[in-house]
């Protein structure tokens, strides 16, 4: 049975409701908002989503999102590329950048090890991290994963993978509350956690 007076409207609501955190009522409000907008504005909105999916790339060095093959952070000669901050996802890069307390590079894993969810090391950007360290230009790797069981498991796995290298391996200070996700931590706390990082072997 059709729930709305227009099949096109219903289809749009269903698509918006697929977005994370968006229920059917919110989806309906968003679609109604678009219907009230000028047609040109809606076309611009639609094209921006299409171009996002078609043209946004993942950096060939750190796996952050970028408009080019190599992201702006990796291209920036003023940053300290001998230091890599390993994070779970792109949101964590944005969160750390907002603290303005870190001027090194990044490595986005694309997740954390989680056997319950069927995610293993081979599903993450682990080998590319190992290769970057083996290249010899890295002096420190900061493990900046969320202090959850999965994050700690991934930290330990990465430490073991990099233990034979001569790089300094550190972990962010535990100013971030246990089980909190990094992207939701306030900027002051997160910034201090980066600045006050400690050697990983102290935390094993």
Image (tube, grey):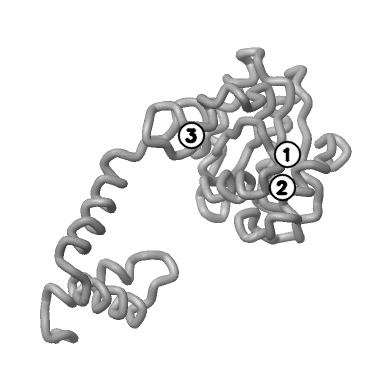
Q: Position of residue 141 (x, y in %)?
A: 70, 30
> Is residue 25 left or right of 188 when viewed as pictured?
left
Residue, disc 1: 156
Residue contact at pointers 1 and 2, CB within 8 angstroms: yes
Question: Which of the 4 quarters of the picture holds residue 73?
Answer: top right
Q: Do the residues labelled 2 and 3 touch (CB within 8 Å)?
A: no
Q: Residue 152 carries which label?
A: 2
Residue sitting at 18 percent across and 71 percent down? 11
Q: How crowded is mark 2: few (under 14 residues within 10 Å), some or many (20 or more)?
A: some
Tell me the distance, in whole angstroms, between the alpha carbons under discs 2 and 3: 21 Å
Q: Are marks 3 and 1 in contact (CB under 8 Å)?
A: no
In the displayed structure, 53 sits above or below 2; it is: above
Residue 116's tag is: none
Q: What element carries label 1?
A: helix
Mark 2 and mark 3 lie on one chain; the one further toward the N terminus is: 3
Q: Which residue is drawn at 85% across and 42% down?
A: 203
Q: Which of marks 2 and 3 is in front?
A: 3
- Judging from the image, what secondary structure is the residue with disc 2 in? helix
Q: For the N terminus, which image quadrant?
A: bottom left
Residue 173 is situated, as x and y percent measured from the top left of the image, at 81, 47
Q: Say above or below: 113 vs 117.
A: above
Q: Can residue 167 be seen in this view?
A: yes
Disc 1 to disc 2, how far (Cα)? 6 Å
Which residue has dot 3 on it?
63
Nearer the observer: mark 3 or 1; the answer is: 3
Quarter of the C terminus within the rendering: top right
**Residue 85: horizontal and vertical position, in percent?**
66, 35
């Amino acid at each position: 049975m059709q729930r709305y007076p227009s099949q096109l409207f219903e289809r749009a609501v269903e698509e918006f409701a697929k977005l994370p955190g968006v229920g059917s009522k919110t989806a309906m409000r968003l679609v109604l908002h678009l219907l009230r907008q000028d047609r040109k504005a809606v076309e611009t909105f639609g094209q921006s989503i299409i171009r996002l999916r078609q043209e946004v790339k993942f950096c060939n060095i750190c796996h952050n999102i970028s408009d080019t093959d190599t992201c702006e952070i990796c291209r920036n000669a003023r940053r300290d590329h001998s230091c890599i901050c390993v994070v779970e996802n792109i949101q964590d890069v944005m969160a750390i950048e907002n603290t303005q307390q870190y001027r090194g590079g990044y490595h986005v894993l694309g997740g954390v090890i989680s056997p319950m969810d069927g995610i293993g090391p081979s599903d993450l950007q682990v080998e590319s991290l190992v290769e970057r360290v083996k290249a010899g230009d890295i002096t420190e790797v900061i493990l900046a994963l969320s202090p959850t069981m999965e994050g700690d498991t991934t930290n330990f796995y990465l430490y073991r993978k990099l233990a034979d290298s001569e790089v300094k391996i550190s972990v962010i200070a535990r100013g971030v509350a246990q089980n909190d996700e990094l992207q939701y931590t306030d900027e002051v706390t997160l910034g201090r956690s980066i600045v006050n990082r400690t050697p990983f072997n102290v935390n094993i």
